[in-house]
């Protein structure tokens, strides 16, 4: 299998051991997960299915960011406990992921369950000169990591702008440099708090994934990724702090998934222009929802259109008409397409061709997670 690697900016052959480690950045459960989230996790699901088909064992970790600025702000607005809010939204998320037939993940650890590992990693960064404390805030010092920018390949000005866009507060007067980022911060009076050597507080956003990935999968991951908008700052910062601690490469393949839009704008909770798996499944069968997403290449940005659902439903009907038909080489064709940087549209085209020729396509559909 060959996969595009964001850091190396090209398609490279995977060379995993018998156990393939995968880490997919999960949701911050303060509101319902939308189609853009589902597209990311579907991509990792297809990757797992093909690897397992080839005989590998896969261990896919998908974290839950159950403590950060967004979820605490929303819990405060609603007047509920942040963990109760997380539990409610995670239940919705799990139902949606079952609708589109995702394989269960190896583990789904929560940020609040990794505070000891987070504190250990921050302590190592401070002790080795990669982080500093000011008034109870602990920052990673980006200038101490010479490869900062290796994942996203953004220039300094772009990184500063993106940091501001994602809540990084480059103008924070406590920072030595605008690109330095928070590892630990004092909690407000109504926020959860844990004791640390820098005072009571809570973790920053980026450190949780480094700590969880290391605890669950080790120092070097075969594949790590998420939506394209996570390349900077989240994944850039993860790589810097992880490699500063371990001295080893953090990720072999950075896999970034295209953004899903609606009416010309990227779907986002802040804009409210969202499409939900659960709503789509009320208007069609769940397999059609999955199939509509499979017809997009994972690295491309794309727009949700209602006709995608009706086309997927028609496609399912054609595929089902072949049950009991003659055998063909379509399964191998699908495997070849998936091995070519998870080219799902090409895989679907191969199944279409076989179906129109009267060959049974059920095994090939099953590899794509579609039960006919």
Image (cartoon, grey):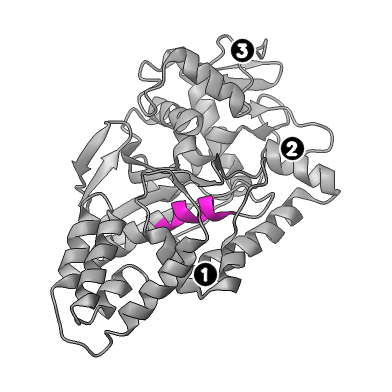
Describe residue 356's horizontal placement relative to residue 135 as left or right.
Answer: left
Q: Is residue 271 magenta?
A: no
Which label sits in the foreground, 2 or 3?
3
For the residue labelled by badge 1, is the local secondary structure a helix, a strand or a loop?
A: helix
Q: Position of residue 269 (x, y in %)?
A: 65, 45
Does residue 102 appear in this view? no
Dominant SS type (magenta): helix
For the residue labelled by badge 3, is the local secondary structure a helix, a strand or a loop?
A: loop
Describe residue 271's horizontal placement relative to residue 338 as left or right.
Answer: right
Q: Position of residue 323 (x, y in %)?
A: 28, 87
Residue 330 versus residue 119: which sits nearer the camera? 330
C-beta proximity under 8 Å, tags 2 and 3: no
Image quadrant of residue 149?
top left
Q: Circle 1 sits on which residue?
A: 98
Does residue 112 appear in this view? yes
C-beta proximity under 8 Å, tags 1 and 2: no
Quarter of the picture holding the C terminus: bottom left
Q: Circle 2 sits on which residue?
A: 193
Q: Which residues are magenta?
A: 34-42
Q: Position of residue 172 (x, y in %)?
A: 66, 14
Mark linked to residue 175: 3
Q: Which residue is outermost to the right?
A: 79
Mark linked to residue 44: none
Residue 67 versus residue 288: which sits nearer the camera? 288
Describe residue 311's horizontal placement relative to residue 181 as left or right.
Answer: left
Residue 173 versus residue 3: which sits nearer the camera? 3
Task: Quote the CA–CA distance across marks 3 and 1.
Answer: 43 Å
Task: Identify the residue at image location x=28%, y=53%.
Answer: 342
């Amino acid at each position: 299998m060959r996969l595009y690697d964001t850091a190396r900016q090209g398609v490279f052959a995977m060379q995993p051991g018998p156990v393939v480690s995968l880490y997919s950045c999960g949701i911050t459960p303060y509101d319902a997960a939308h189609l853009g989230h589902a597209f990311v996790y579907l991509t990792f699901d297809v990757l797992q299915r093909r690897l397992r088909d080839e005989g590998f064992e896969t261990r896919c970790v998908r974290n839950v960011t159950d403590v950060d600025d967004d979820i605490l702000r929303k819990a405060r607005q609603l007047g509920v406990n942040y963990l109760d809010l997380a539990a409610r939204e995670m239940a919705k998320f799990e139902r949606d992921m079952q609708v589109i037939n995702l394989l269960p993940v190896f583990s789904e650890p929560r940020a609040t369950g990794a505070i000891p590992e987070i504190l250990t990693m921050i302590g190592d960064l401070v002790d080795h000169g990669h982080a500093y404390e000011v008034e109870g805030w602990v920052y990673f010092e980006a200038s101490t990591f010479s490869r900062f920018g290796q994942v996203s390949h953004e220039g300094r000005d772009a990184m500063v702008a993106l940091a501001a866009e994602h809540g990084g507060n480059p103008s924070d007067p406590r920072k030595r440099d605008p690109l330095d980022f928070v590892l630990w911060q004092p909690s407000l009076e109504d926020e959860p708090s844990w004791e640390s050597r820098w005072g009571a507080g809570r973790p920053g956003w980026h450190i949780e994934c480094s700590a969880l990935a290391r605890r669950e999968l080790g120092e070097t991951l075969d594949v790590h990724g998420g939506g394209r908008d996570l390349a900077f700052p989240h994944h850039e910062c993860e790589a810097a702090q992880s490699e500063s601690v371990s001295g080893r490469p953090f990720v072999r393949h950075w896999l970034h998934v295209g953004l899903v839009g609606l009416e010309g704008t990227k779907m986002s909770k802040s804009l409210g222009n969202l499409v939900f798996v659960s709503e789509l499944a009320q208007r069609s069968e769940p397999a059609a929802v999955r199939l509509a997403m499979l017809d997009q290449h994972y690295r491309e940005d794309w727009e949700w259109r209602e006709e995608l659902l009706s086309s997927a439903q028609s496609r399912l009907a054609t595929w089902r008409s072949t049950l009991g038909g003659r055998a063909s080489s379509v399964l191998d064709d699908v495997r070849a397409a998936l091995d070519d940087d998870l080219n799902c549209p090409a895989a679907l085209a191969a199944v279409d061709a076989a179906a129109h020729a009267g060959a049974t396509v059920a095994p090939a559909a099953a590899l794509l997670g579609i039960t006919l």
